[in-house]
Each structure stands twice: as C-alpha cells, then as structure tokens.
Image: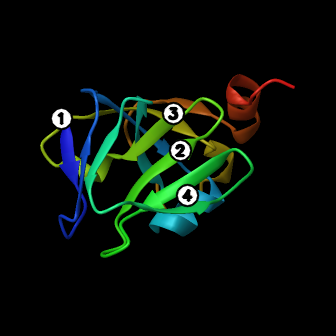
Amino acid sequence: MKGKCLCGAIEVTAPDHHEAGLCHCTMCRRWTGGPMFAVHCGADVQFNGAAPAVYRSSDWAERGFCPQCGTHLFYHLLPANEYVLSAGLFQDQPFELRNEIFIDEKPSYYAFSNETRKMTGQQVFEQYAPGD
C-alpha cells in the first residue's frame, strides 16, 4: 500500500493490510489529538522523498513525522523493528477497525461502536514488552 503525508513531501510504502487498531494511551492522544488510528506493518516499510523527523518517545520507541507539514507518520517499536503507521496516510485503503489498546486510558468524551478486541495498558506490556 502507498500513502503520503499532508504536503506530499514523504511517500510511504508498506505491505497491504486491512486491519487497523486504536491506541488510547495518553502519549498517542497528546500526539494526535485523539486516539491513534494505527496499522501494524512490521519492518518492511519504505519512506521516499524527505527524511522523516524522529522523536525518541521512550527507551523502546520513537515517533516519526514530516518535518515540513507535521503529519504523524509512525510509531517505531525499536526492539522488534516494527513500524506502526498512521492509518490516515493511506486514503484509499479499506481498513477494518479490529482492536483497541490502552482502553483503561481512554477518556469518557468519545466512544466507538465497532466490536473490537480491547486490551488494557498492562495487558499490552505483558504481551509485547521485550523480555529481560
């Protein structure tokens, strides 16, 4: 699948995916202004055009954005080299909302009617945290 940032300076290419998820963590909500609509794309992601700007948001992850228009591009999980891309980059992709994480941090001012698999922050860390 191919997508691009708002100004078109960065084009993103990733394997086709049809599932999207939401992250309700406080950091994603501060970064995006709401939940992050996310597509897990693994390591096989290419960025063409301008180089993404990167912010190291934790010991294990960084977030990327377009340095020209500010479009949120990715959450990059460093230990697994997994890119979680913003679903909004791919305007023509027919995503299906399947899961929500950090549901325990979701504020009460919004709700989604989709039937999704929901995980708390603790459940996410138990399932995905790198081992010691």
Give the Cα separation between the discs numbered 4 and 3.
Answer: 17 Å
Answer with mark 4 or mark 3, whichever residue precedes in sequence.
Answer: 4
Q: Amino acid at mark 1?
A: Pro
Q: Position of residue 4 (x, y in %)?
A: 21, 55
Give the Cα separation between the discs numbered 4 and 2.
Answer: 13 Å
Query: Which of the labelled discs sits on residue 94, or is there none?
Result: 1
Q: Is residue 72 left or right of residue 61?
A: left
Give the Cα separation between the discs numbered 2 and 3.
Answer: 6 Å
Q: Position of residue 57 (x, y in %)?
A: 65, 59
> Few, some or many C-alpha atoms within 10 Å of disc 4 (few <14, some 14-19, many ≥20)?
some
Mark 2 = which residue? 76
Answer with mark 1 or mark 4, whichever residue precedes in sequence.
Answer: 4
Q: For the C terminus, which image quadrant?
A: top right
Q: Position of residue 88 (x, y in %)?
A: 28, 52
Q: Nearer the viewer, mark 4 or mark 2?
A: 2
Give the Cα separation between the discs numbered 1 and 4.
Answer: 23 Å
Is residue 115 visible from the viewing direction of this image?
yes
Q: Is residue 131 left or right of residue 55?
A: right
Mark 3 = which residue? 82
Query: Which of the labelled discs sits on residue 28, or is there none?
Result: 4
Q: Is residue 101 left or right of residue 47?
A: right
Q: Position of residue 12 (x, y in %)?
A: 26, 46
